[in-house]
Amino acid sequence: MDGWHVRGAAVGIEVRVGEVVVSVRRHDEEHVVDGIGSPGVSHRGKAWIEIVDGQLGEVGMTASDVRSIGLCVQEAADPLRGRAWEEALAERFPHVPVVRGDADGFAAYGEHVHGAGGGARVLLSAHVSTGFGAGLVVGGTIFRSGALEALGSGPLGRPRLVERVHERYRGLRADLPARPVEVVWRAKEHDPACVQVLHEVGRALGAELARVRAVVDPDVIVLGGDLSFAPDALVRGPVREELERAASPGDRPVVVRKSRLADLAGARGALAFAAS
């Protein structure tokens, strides 16, 4: 498909824990519109259809104008549902090809095409939210590396952000954060446990990324997910310090950026991949 000279639209969908993120773009325009479904949305219901139809309407299109769909399902959202989503999409959009990919890979691709990773030769995208994930784009192509599979299996992976804060305040207070992004918000308000947890995560993430850097040699690292909202001093700063501490003489400098897409990265990557 020669991209944007074809009349119609491309759709990118990421199924997350409790919600669905949708990105839509006309083939003949640069503008992308995004929408996020409410918690509890399911492939069996009508809510996700309304989201897609609404986004299509914003770009002057309907379901019959869709030419390609990209789909990714976060592992934490149960990858077994991916097949059910494909079937639901086939019913709603018959004869439209659905390209299904890895959520972390699509998130990295989204940063490469639409976000903070533009211009990078080797882009490494990492995020910490309800879980941990990382994706790699090399020369504009999603690349799978065994070095990424070990990320998050150690102290970075568990316990999660929310669990770590709950451990600090066990028995001391009841108004505890329920979502990772709430940990970030409270850290901005100088909550001591949230500040400490984010700083620990920044250090742990930096140490993990330093090990991966030795294998994949990225020139840009993008910190996404809920980390993209965290103060630099708590996450991006510690990550950079750990990378510098582990660097060897002659290592190329690596730029560490916060995501500009945050939770939209996966859907944007699915959109760009499907339309390519």
Image (cartoon, rainbow, N blue to C red):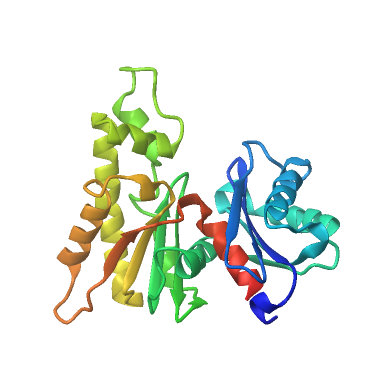
Q: Quadrant of the C terminus?
A: bottom right
For image coordinates 78% across by 41% down, the residue present is 46
Q: Nearer the viewer, residue 147 or 104?
A: 104
For image coordinates 29% across by 29% down, the residue present is 168
Q: Position of residue 17 (x, y in %)?
A: 58, 43
Q: Position of residue 149 (x, y in %)?
A: 45, 64
Q: Is residue 148 above or below residue 235?
A: below
Tell me the quarter of the picture where residue 2 sits.
bottom right
For image coordinates 85% across by 68% down, the residue present is 95
Q: Quadrant of the N terminus?
A: bottom right
Give left or right: position of 168 versus 150. left
Q: Is residue 22 above or below residue 109?
A: above
Q: Position of residue 236 (x, y in %)?
A: 27, 54
Tell me the quarter of the picture where residue 195 sits.
top left
Q: Is residue 122 above or below residue 269?
A: below
Q: Is residue 144 visible?
A: yes
Q: Position of residue 263 (x, y in %)?
A: 50, 50
For image coordinates 39% across by 17% down, the residue present is 174
Give left or right: position of 265 versus 71. left
Q: Is residue 69 visible?
A: no
Give left or right: position of 228 versus 108. left
Q: Nearer the viewer, residue 174 or 237?
A: 237
